[in-house]
Image (tube, rainbow, N blue to C red):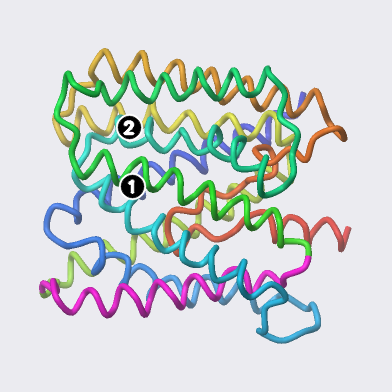
Amino acid sequence: MNLAGPLYALLAFAIFATHDVVIKFLGGTYSPFQLIFFTTLFSFPLVMFMLIKDASHGNLRPVHPWWLAIRTGFATITGFTAFYAFSVLPLAQTYVLLFATPLLITLLSIPILGEKVGVHRLGAVLLGLIGVLIVLQPGATELTLGHLAGITSAVSNAMASIIVRKIGQDERPVVLMLYPMVAAFIVMGILMCFVYVPMPLVDLGGVVVISALGFTAGLVLIAAYRNGDAAIVAPMQYSQIIWASIFGYFLFGEEVERATVIGAGIIILSGLYIVFRETRLGAKSQTPVLRTRSRGMTAASFRISVFLRRQKARG
């Protein structure tokens, strides 16, 4: 067994977790609008470095403008709600809510991709959603805007990922990545005007760190998928819950609640089972979860799949 793929993946998600810690630190002082605006600003040169290598012929006019517009809207919502959730919720709880994304991708693949999802995967989705309810404990605990943001981010990320699966073969990587970045930059820039707080140099440096960590984690994740099977690499995302527990306890004094542990276990098992079923079905399935290889929560977390596809075509 080639261990390079999963080891690269573990490193990538450790970097992503560190990236989220910086977001949480700065989120206590600055609004998500301001953080995303500057993160996107500093991410432009990094992502353009990747896009400049795109030798495919064409222009910036999308082949599927309406689908791209919808995807851009969902990507913008994903970034804002994820930043807000990380800012106000315990790290471990935020990750558990975001881990619902593969479950939602499985459901959304039915109407959008025409995927036939059998009783096994539907059962796994239902079980995973029960896990989400266990974490939220409706009626027993107060549900906040942070919880709503976490759930919204998972839904929006799933929608954006499914749309990329639908149009990704036709659109150029530069189109898929540039439009959401420009939209986030403009929308967050406008909204930031109402809540702007001057940033000292050290905090501005923190935003640069967020951009650099997101970009670096993306490169390492590409290396993971190039050196390992998706069925082995994809589940490594759940290692983030370990980092969240460690960082949350030592840096923010967060205790992981029993409901979060139980819910996380159920959601993770459901996600792993869906990956197992897609792997087993192979050509009989469009494998929407296995082929969703990007974390996709910030501008610097660029789309992994488009670059992997391009490298495969060259090879």
* Residue plotted at (84% across, 31% down): 282
Camera-side residue of 90 and 123 = 123
Across and down, in percent, residue 172 comes to 72, 72
User: Image quadrant of residue 110?
Assistant: top right
Q: Earlier in the sequence, mark 2 or mark 1?
A: 1
* Residue plotted at (42% across, 19% down): 130
The span shown in magenta is 170-197
Quarter in which the C terminus is drawn = bottom right
Across and down, in percent, residue 15 comes to 43, 45
* Residue plotted at (29% across, 30% down): 93
Left or right: residue 60 versus residue 281 is: left
5 is higher (above) or lower (below) than 187: above
273 is higher (above) or lower (below) than 243: above
Across and down, in percent, residue 128 comes to 48, 22
Residue under circle 1?
20
Amino acid under disc 1:
Asp
User: Image quadrant of residue 8?
Assistant: top right
188 is higher (above) or lower (below) than 248: below
Residue under circle 2?
244
Q: Main secondary structure of the magenta part?
A: helix
